[in-house]
Image: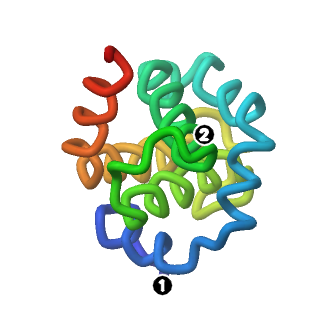
């Protein structure tokens, strides 16, 4: 039995995020972004994907630190989950394989919604 991809799933996964995971998201950001720009269920989250990658990059660079590490860990966990083709439902299964990615992404967006609003305001300057 596996955890269903919801807010608790993201919180649990975030607890295991390391600095190496943050670096992986930074280093693989273009590859992750391609997952959002592809046709399919993730296409509707293009802007959200860009925002999630941007907040991680700004946090890692030290440019933006007004976000709890737990939010960054949740975002990193989610982006690595989306990147991984062998998650709960393998991405090789057309459309169905991305539905779990959408569920995890949606759960993450709910968890970090307030932090993302603050970040957007900061970006606008």
In the image: residue 39, left or right of residue 25: left
Rounded to the nearest whole Å, what is the CA distance between mark 2 and mark 1?
34 Å
Q: Residue at x 77, y 33 (%)?
A: 31
**Rendered-image quadrant of the C terminus:** top left
The answer to whether 116 is drawn above or below residue 25 in the figure is above
Residue ranking furthest to the bottom:
1
Q: Position of residue 3 (x, y in %)?
A: 42, 76
Q: Secondary structure at mark 1?
A: loop
Q: Position of residue 2 (x, y in %)?
A: 48, 79
In the image: residue 103, left or right of residue 33: left
Q: Residue at x 78, y 41 (%)?
A: 28
Dot 2 alpha-carbon crowd within 10 angstroms: few under 14, some 14 to 19, many 20 or more = some
Dot 1 alpha-carbon crowd within 10 angstroms: few under 14, some 14 to 19, many 20 or more = few
Res. 118 image quadrant:
top left
Q: Residue at x 33, y 15 (%)?
A: 124
Res. 121 image quadrant:
top left
In the image: residue 102, left or right of residue 119: right
Q: Residue at x 56, y 36 (%)?
A: 53
In the image: residue 94, left or right of residue 49: right
Q: Which residue is mark 2?
A: 57
The answer to whether 57 is drawn above or below residue 110 in the figure is above
Q: Position of residue 71 (x, y in %)?
A: 37, 58
Q: Which residue is mark 1?
A: 1
Which is in the foreground here, disc 2 or disc 1?
2
Lower sequence index among marks 2 and 1? 1
Q: Secondary structure at mark 2?
A: helix
């Amino acid at each position: 039995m596996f955890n269903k991809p919801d807010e608790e799933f993201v919180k649990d996964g975030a607890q295991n995020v390391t600095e190496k995971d943050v670096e992986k998201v930074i280093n693989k950001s273009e590859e992750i972004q391609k997952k959002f720009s592809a046709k399919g269920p993730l296409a509707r989250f293009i802007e959200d994907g860009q925002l999630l990658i941007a907040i991680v990059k700004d946090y890692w660079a030290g440019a933006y630190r007004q976000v709890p590490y737990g939010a960054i860990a949740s975002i990193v966990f989610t982006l690595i989950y989306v990147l991984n083709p062998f998650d709960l439902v393998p991405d090789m299964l057309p459309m169905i394989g991305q539905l779990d990615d959408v569920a995890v992404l949606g759960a993450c967006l709910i968890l970090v919604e307030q932090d993302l609003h603050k970040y957007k305001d900061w970006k606008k300057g």
